[in-house]
Amino acid sequence: MLLIRCPYCEEERPELEFRNAGEAHIARSVNIAGETDDDFEKFFFIRSNPKGIIYERWRHMHGCARFFNAVRDTVTDKFVMTYKAGEPKPSKLPGVAK
Amino acid sequence: MSGAFRIPGAGRFKQAKTARFSFDGQSYAGIEGDTLASALLANGVHLVGRSFKYHRPRGILSAGAEEPNALVEIKRDAARKTPNVRATVQELYDGLDAQSQNRWPSLSFDVGAVNDIASPLFSAGFYYKTFMWPKAAWKSLYEPKIRAAAGLGVSPDQPDPDHYSSRYAHCDVLVLGGGAAGIAAALAAAETGMRVILADEQAEFGGSLRFETGAKIDGQDGFAWAQGTIAKLSAMDNVRVLSRTTAFGYYAQNFVGLVERVSDHLKTPGHDLARERLWQIRAKRVVLASGAIERHMVFADNDRPGIMLAGAARTYLNHYGVAVGKNVGVYTANDSAYAAAIDLKKAGVNVAAIIDLRDNPTGPVIDEARALGIEVNFGRAVIRAGGKLRVSSMTVQPKNGGGERTIPVDAILMSAGWTPSVHLFSQSRGKVAFNDETKRFVPGTYAQDCVSVGACNGTDGLSATVDEAYAAGAKAAKDAGAKIAKGTKPKVDASESWSRGMLGAAPGAGPDTTVKAFVDFQNDVTAKDIRQAVHEGMRSIEHVKRFTTNGMATDQGKTSNMHGLAIAAETLGKPIPEVGLTTFRAPYTPVTFGAIVSHARGPLFDPTRSTAIHPWAEAQGAVFEDVGQWKRAWYFPKAGEDMHAAVDRECVAVRKTAGLFDASTLGKIEVVGPDAAKFMELLYTNPWEKLEPGRCRYGIMLREDGFIYDDGVVGRLAPDRFHVTTTTGGAPRVMNHMEDYLQTEFPHLNVWLTSITEQWAVIAVQGPKSRDIIAPLVEGIDMSDEALPHMSVREGRICGVPTRLFRMSFTGERGFEVNVPVDYGQAVWEALWAEGQKHGAAAYGTEAMHVLRAEKGYIIVGQDTDGTVTPNDAGLDWAVGKKKPDFVGIRGMARPDLVAKGRKQLVGLKTRDPKVVLEEGAQIVEDPKQAIPMKMIGHVTSSYWSENCGRSIALALVAGGRDRMGDTLYVPMPNGVIEVEVTGMVFFDERGGRLNG
Ligand SMILES: [Zn+2]
């Protein structure tokens, strides 16, 4: 069982309290009704599936109930860092070589 | 006397009490402290089981958890029968009742042993080859026969009456393994004051100190030092010592699963004692001190009872005081077996000969053996064992060929060397590295905050082990945050040491194809099988393993993996590391379901939710159905009524007078805040800004892909307050969906969401008399049609308690839903019920509710929709706000496929024969005479007998359904084709006049 740091509660809590909510940093267009089929396809269906670093949304379901973002390594399952929803994608990751 | 093979003065249980036990119905005496294996051996019993595939007689190979052969059933009573218990691990208690397994009619005469003769049929890959065709024979012939003939034990057929407990724990340093290394590491960590947990699978700590009588630490016998140090550690507040506790799984971030066997060793486990306790420990640092496991020699008939690991024989002698024979032979490829021979010889057992495969080994143990007068032969191999139910001889030959000599023996002690136990390290995702010099896989790259010490790290010798372990324990504590270190390292005064040995098949393993030289005893895999797998094209060890099943038994190849790998590598002509080692998986040893499940069984398996009105429904004799975690009243049968009769009566009563229905399970969410209406506009397809407070609207929620996600009636209580209802099953995910959008896409909206499902009990009162039933109990709400029209909501009081009174209908009749605080739910229900009785109202359940709504063509999300249905498909276009610039699903709904012609649309179906009720899920075709497979154009989603309509009714999703009104379609069923007519979805009161009736 993983330990996940909730950026709102500011502590590590067991995985059981959390729920994954898919890939992060995929913004819904403010003019979604006017989007082309291609743009909507990219927004709604296409997801990256990297071997290595992935940016994900998680929810502290059985805690503060907040959605937040996490950087996780899909090979080791390790969480590199977590940060609040709405914050930009981190440019530097602790302990990860570029 | 506790057995003829118990040696007076030997062993550590000199004052022990006698414990009587039975094996296959025969009564024996052992002593407290024995394992079942040591007690059997003390009585000269070596034959304890039959093998999995060939039903060969098997004995006791080891003295620990690695045991592949000595699996027995332990029976306490009819419900407490545990199969596949390793006799080497089961502690003896007075009255223990054990049975051998996998034999019929008896252990010494087993009919299944014919498999041994017919063995060409069971060669490697036999499952894949022999039993392929005909397919039908699998079910009727092959599988039952194989299951009966090849199998391990019989599972109990009664519920497990024992209880199990579960604990979570945190510590700074977790030490796994309580031999010299583990104890030294735990001591060093404990002396810093950090929180330490030390666990070992045995009843007593000490590991190999149990048999290494040459070890001296801090001036004491090694085993005595271990007991003294454990006593010291146990007395420390910062240390928890767990014996009989196996670490079975090493998971992410130093999370380790352990099972403690609490009462399996007790004669009469107290009722208050759990049988086992599951420990889930999170450690800052883990020290792995899991030791090493001795390998057997691979030679012909090396599985005969009486042939065992040398270290095991030594354990039986030095720890339990039991000689494994009177005239033993030794077959070895390393030094450690000499120590066993020496100890046995000194105890008065005749050692017939030591056969050493090595050419000219030298060392003190060899000299000592010779000095004791033991015959020692170098460069020779045991090419086969004689005897069947017990080994009777060993046949020896120079390893490069030459004259044979047969030596009578009643036991053979063997040692091919020691394999570091890297199981837990491998489970931690660490990568092992092959040491070419010592031919061992040892921990290489670490993936977690752990360290391996002692034999599991490939460290040889007690002195080096204690040094390494003590330093590692101190460092682990420091890394976990320790500030001080004040202990003294234990001093090793004398130790035994050996390494090396051999991997793979010895000369006695073939090449003759009729030879059975076992690599994996439990799965009956021979050296020949592994060679054959390579010859048949298997290249990777993962393939060889699956083809031969080597290492795939319940012992996970603890003794066999390295031999199997070496034989495959040799046959392939490749170095061992290139063929690879299989990854070890949890559990290290089998774990009971009881330990994992613990109290989460029966009623505690999953939470049960029941409503405030549940006790009333129960008292009325309602039949309940499960809807998610909810128990819902399904129907209320009167005396003599079956379900059909009850539902018909309930449905008629609602339309004739009135019915009461417990709708409390409906999901309810309060959406509150200055931007509540804006938020509702975005989350639902309907327009909300202009909905007046006090009015309700049927809302549809979509996913972003444009498909229906949920629906429900929403009442606007105030400009900034909406009372939203959801489907019973949808409440949690709708709440999650709303929170997701509110927190991440629309965080600028000033809105709060609160789940109020469990705050309000909901009583639906539906039917022409509904107002007459409610009105006398209501205060402060004008119940007239003008003041409270259909689809409106008022706050007031009923029976003196607050209510949110909805005028709404899921039946098509005049109807109300009375929300009251949940604590008053049953009282208000009973008051309404009393009023209802004056008018002849009935209580109705979910089945009648379903029928009534289907009569009106009201859909149920999740039954008439399946996640691929749009509002248009469901005929609900009217509920989509056409002028809205945005809502979740607006773009998805416009995708080309979702607006294309010919989509499946929800329609009604009437069977030509009104008495025939369609089956839900049945497929629909245009032409029933077409060839199979037919083109299916839709399926039935809802289907009922409607007593109110006097006929069957159904809803269905049919391609282009709304263009087929009046068409005839067909539903092919096993008993014939059913003819149906496509109709509208409303079967009763099409004009809707009854809403105000
Ligand atoms: Zn949190």
Image (cartoon, coloured by chain):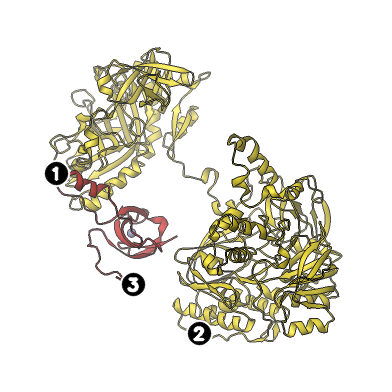
Give the residue at mark 3. A95
Q: Is residue B494 visible?
A: yes
Q: How far apart are labels 3 and 2 at the CA level?
A: 30 Å
Kindly indicate the quadrant of the structure image that contains residue B710. Answer: top left
Write down the quadrant of residue B70 in the picture. bottom right
Q: Which mark, by number, is residue A34?
A: 1
Which quadrant would the N terminus of chain B be assigned to in this image?
A: bottom right
Q: Could you tell me how many numbered marks the image carries?
A: 3
- Identify the element where label 1 is drawn: helix
Identify which amino acid the numbered label 2 is placed on: Ala
* Label 2 within 8 A of ligand 1 by Cβ: no
Determine whether the residue tagged by mark 3 lies in a helix, strand or loop: loop
Q: Would you name the residue on which mark 2 appears?
A: B485
| Side (left or right) of B122 relative to A50 | right
Tag on residue B258? Answer: none
Subunit ID for the residue under disc 1: A
Quarter of the figure with the C terminus of chain B: top left
Q: Nearer the viewer, residue B874 or B948?
A: B874
Q: Residue at x 32, y 54 (%)?
A: A65
In this view, the residue in front, B914 or B310, is B310
Can I make out residue B837 in this image? no
Q: Is residue B35 above or below residue B487?
A: above
Looking at the rendered image, the disc whose residue lies closer to the viewer, 3 or 2, is 3
Q: Nearer the viewer, residue B302 or B144?
A: B302
x and y, in percent, of residue B194 in the image: 50, 76
Tint of chain A? red
Q: Amino acid at mark 3?
A: Gly
**Residue at 34%, 41% in the rendered image:** B731
